[in-house]
Image (spheres, rainbow, N blue to C red):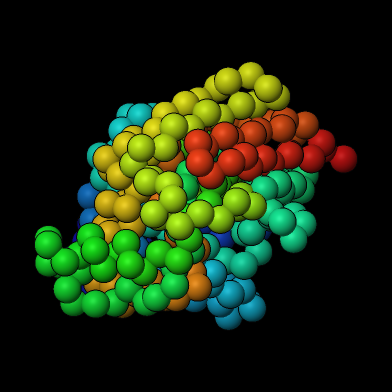
Amino acid sequence: MPDTQTTASDLVTAAVERLTAAAESGVPCAPVRDLIGTDDVSVAYAVQQQLTRGRLAAGARVVGHKIGLTSPAVQQQLGVDQPDFGVLFDDMDVTTGSEGGAGVVPSGRLIQPKVEAEIAFVLGADLDDPDLDDPDRGPAIVRAAVDHEVAAIEVVDSRVEGWDIRITDTVADNASSGLFVLGGQRRKLAEVEPADTPMRLYRNDELVSEGTGAACLGDPLTALLWLARTARNHGDPLRSGQVVLSGALGPMVPALPGDVVRAEISGLGTVAVTFANEE
């Protein structure tokens, strides 16, 4: 990439415009790594942050964050070797009913959706403590900040044609975020240990993915600690009340209109999402 600040800014803007056009039109675009390179994750986050500012200016509200690429299986699927994170907005939550546990994806809302089963944490305290970097204190600070955990389905999506992504493509594209559904059974960490939790994911009653909490960086709480440190270092620390999707517990699977996807996470119950038929 050229090294002048003006040129770098122009390339970030070009990437934002490309991804925005894809999101608005529903027509996937070429990867943005031809603009911002394949290795400089900080530039990719600059694209993501500019897209976030645009969403906020249009009236969206941040409700949390997602951690991506925590499962070795998913990393292998996408050809990347490190986690990333994105922002969750209020209109991404398609949980229906007061009890939760189910959701509906409207026809045409996404471009090329795939589904992951995850554990979601809802925070009861801010995570901006400098001691998060302390290897002895950091894990305890994160654990104490979790109000409760629930089963979740994340419906990921990519504005990049054919999911032809590398790390800078997915980071720029808000970590390939789409929608999410939260389960209805709230549990304290003392009740269900995330690392030991088996998961099974069914599409139209066929088992299509399975794994455990250990597939998520060894422990979903380890993923949460990574996010807490990283988000704080990016000037956007995690806040009380926010939802954190901690990462896939098994391989992601594609979904088509008419599909019903159900995740069963031991100790956290069941969560399901229905993909509406095309009109």
Q: Residue at x 27, y 52 (%)?
A: 222
Using the image, determine if residue 194 lies above or below residue 44: above
Task: Return the x and y of residue 92 as percentages of the image width and height.
Answer: 62, 59
Q: Is residue 135 left or right of residue 126?
A: left
Using the image, determine if residue 168 lies above or below residue 162: below
Q: Is residue 33 left or right of residue 204?
A: left
In the image shown, does 93 or 169 lie closer to the viewer?
93
In the image shown, does 265 or 54 lie closer to the viewer?
265
Task: Return the x and y of residue 192 as percentages of the image width and height.
Answer: 43, 47
Identify the image quadrant of the C terminus.
Answer: top right
Task: Return the x and y of residue 202 as percentages of the image width and height.
Answer: 61, 26
Q: Is residue 169 visible?
A: no
Q: Residue at x 12, y 61 (%)?
A: 135
Using the image, determine if residue 262 lies above or below residue 151: above
Task: Return the x and y of residue 48 as percentages of the image width and height.
Answer: 42, 64
Residue 225: name its quadrant. bottom left
Q: Residue at x 30, y 64 (%)?
A: 142
In the image shown, does 142 or 12 lie closer to the viewer?
142
Residue placed furthest toward the right: 279
Residue placed furthest toward the front: 191
